[in-house]
């Protein structure tokens, strides 16, 4: 019963010493005992290392207790065991420090790996942003190209309008020259007409209005051609009217000449009648003086009277013809006046139509001018938008350049980080290889220590036998 209690007390003391040893090692390494045991178990590729360490600590503790119980039985061996225990503690402390450094480096490597992942995500985000900016830049370039095309189209339209205006101006200039030629011809015709001063004035005003229309409305060539055609028709009508007037005038002149001839003949006949009257009066006086007449003289007198009657009848016929010619001349003048009034009414109507057309053309010209001003304003706004778009494009290009620089910097940093990671990985590999080599050396040392422990166990058996013998001696003495 006493032996069992002694063994139980010995085992309890041994466990306590082992736990105290583990606690001191943990305090030495500034870790928990369980973490130390887990680190020792995880750091070895062979699970027997942990078991050997525990057995070694337990056996060394047992040896220490036995040495203390032996009360200085072999101090040299006890010092040797203490030295071996200190050496083992130092080796385990060194190994634990290396393991902790390796864990810290692994943790640092993990942090750097996380940072590298974050930087990769940032780089991917920057690449995505760069892609979006390039897409926006492409869209901006397409919009800029559309604006440039629109501006080019407007410029081409303006150039075409200027060319059309120039061609219309040239056509109207030639038409104006032609109108001037017609005006000269009309002036020549109107200068030859007498009694048509009002018509000439109206024609002059009409030509002035035509010139004003030709000068103001340069791009309406069709209307000018139509007006010129109307003027040509009017000139033809005037020529026809003048020709008819000339024909009537010739007829009147002929009738007047005939009347003059008849007047001359009548004057001659009257002079002859007067002469015959005088002669008859002389004859009558002679007859009265002579109181005699002959049958021949009476016959001559009768013939003279008949001749006078005939001449008087012819004179009446001439007067009637003169009255008829006068009536025809009045009718012709009335017809000319009516025709002139009709032409005046036609001119006034055409003038009103041309005035209305002129107002329409002026309104159209004002609308065209307003459209031109709107086009100029649109062109100005497009130019301003184009300038703003150029500024935005330059800013976006600068941002793209800055992003490219940032991407280049991130790429360089990523390359540096990758090189650092490679160097860190190689260093960790070297450390791992060195740790494995250290573990291999420790395993070899553990094997050697195992052999030494076997020798120590043999010595412990000797100490145990001595202890048992000493106990028996004590029991026998008691």
Image (cartoon, rainbow, N blue to C red):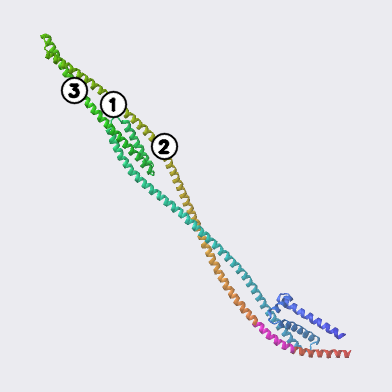
Using the image, determine if residue 359 lies above or below residue 118: above
Label for residue 328?
1
Q: Earlier in the sequence, mark 2 or mark 1?
A: 1
Q: Position of residue 96 (x, y in %)?
A: 69, 78
Q: Residue at x 60, y 77 (%)?
A: 427
Q: Is residue 267 visible?
A: yes
Q: Mark 2: few, some, or many residues within 10 Å (few <14, many ≥20)?
A: few
Q: Earlier in the sequence, mark 3 or mark 2?
A: 3
Q: Main secondary structure of the magenta part?
A: helix
Q: Residue furthest front?
A: 295
Give the distance between the C-alpha atoms of the residues marked 1 and 3, in whole angstroms.
23 Å
The extreme right residue here reads: 478
- Vertical position of residue 388 compared to residue 41: above or below: above
Figure quadrant of the C terminus: bottom right
Q: Position of residue 313 (x, y in %)?
A: 22, 19
- Identify whether 229 is placed above or below 461: above
Task: Point out the stretch of residues depicted in magenta.
Answer: 437-454
CA–CA distance in space, label 2 to label 1: 41 Å
- In which image quadrant can residue 260 be found? top left
Residue placed under numbered mark 3 in the picture: 265
Q: Nearer the viewer, residue 248 or 178?
A: 248
Examine the rendered structure and indicate whether residue 86 appears above or below residue 322: below
């Amino acid at each position: 019963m006493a032996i069992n209690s002694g063994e139980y007390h010995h085992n309890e003391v041994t466990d306590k010493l082992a736990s105290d040893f583990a606690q001191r090692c943990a305090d030495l390494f500034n870790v928990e005992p369980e973490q130390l045991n887990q680190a020792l178990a995880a750091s070895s590729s062979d699970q027997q290392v942990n078991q050997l360490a525990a057995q070694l600590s337990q056996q060394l503790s047992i040896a220490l207790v036995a040495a203390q119980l032996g009360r200085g039985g072999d101090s040299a061996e006890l010092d040797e065991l203490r030295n071996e225990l200190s050496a083992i503690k130092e080796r385990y402390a060194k190994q634990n420090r290396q393991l902790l450094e390796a864990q810290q480096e692994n943790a640092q490597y993990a942090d750097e790996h996380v940072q590298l992942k974050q930087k990769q995500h940032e780089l991917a985000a920057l690449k995505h942003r760069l892609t979006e900016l390039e897409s926006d830049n492409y869209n901006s370039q397409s919009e800029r190209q559309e604006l440039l095309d629109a501006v080019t189209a407007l410029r081409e339209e303006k150039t075409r309008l200027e060319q059309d205006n120039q061609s219309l101006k040239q056509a109207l200039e030639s038409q104006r020259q032609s109108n001037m030629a017609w005006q000269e011809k009309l002036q020549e015709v109107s200068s030859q007409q007498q009694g048509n001063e009002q018509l000439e004035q109206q024609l002059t005003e009409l030509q002035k209005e035509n010139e004003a229309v030709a000068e103001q409305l340069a791009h309406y060539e069709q209307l000018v051609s139509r007006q010129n055609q109307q003027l040509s028709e009017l000139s033809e009508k005037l020529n026809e009217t003048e020709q008819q007037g000339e024909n009537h005038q010739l007829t009147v002149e002929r009738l007047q000449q005939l009347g003059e001839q008849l007047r001359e003949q009548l004057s001659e006949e009257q002079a002859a009648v007067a002469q015959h009257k005088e002669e008859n009066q002389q004859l009558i006086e002679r007859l009265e003086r002579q109181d005699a007449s002959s049958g021949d003289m009476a016959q001559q007198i009768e013939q003279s009277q008949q001749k006078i009657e005939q001449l008087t009848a012819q004179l009446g016929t001439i007067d009637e013809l003169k009255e008829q010619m006068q009536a025809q001349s009045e009718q012709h003048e009335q017809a000319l006046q009516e025709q002139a009034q009709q032409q005046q009414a036609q001119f006034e109507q055409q003038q009103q139509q041309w005035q209305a057309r002129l107002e329409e053309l002026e309104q159209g010209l004002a609308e065209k001018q307003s459209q031109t001003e709107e086009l100029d304003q649109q062109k100005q706004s497009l130019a301003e938008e184009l300038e703003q778009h150029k500024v935005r494009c330059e800013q976006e290009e600068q941002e793209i350049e800055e992003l490219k620089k940032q991407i280049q910097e991130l790429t360089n940093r990523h390359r540096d980080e990758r090189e650092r990671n490679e160097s860190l990985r190689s260093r960790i590999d070297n450390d791992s290889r060195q740790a494995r080599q250290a573990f291999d050396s420790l395993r070899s040392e553990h094997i050697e220590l195992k052999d030494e422990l076997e020798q120590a166990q043999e010595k412990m058996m000797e100490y145990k036998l001595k202890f048992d013998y000493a106990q028996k001696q004590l029991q026998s003495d008691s």
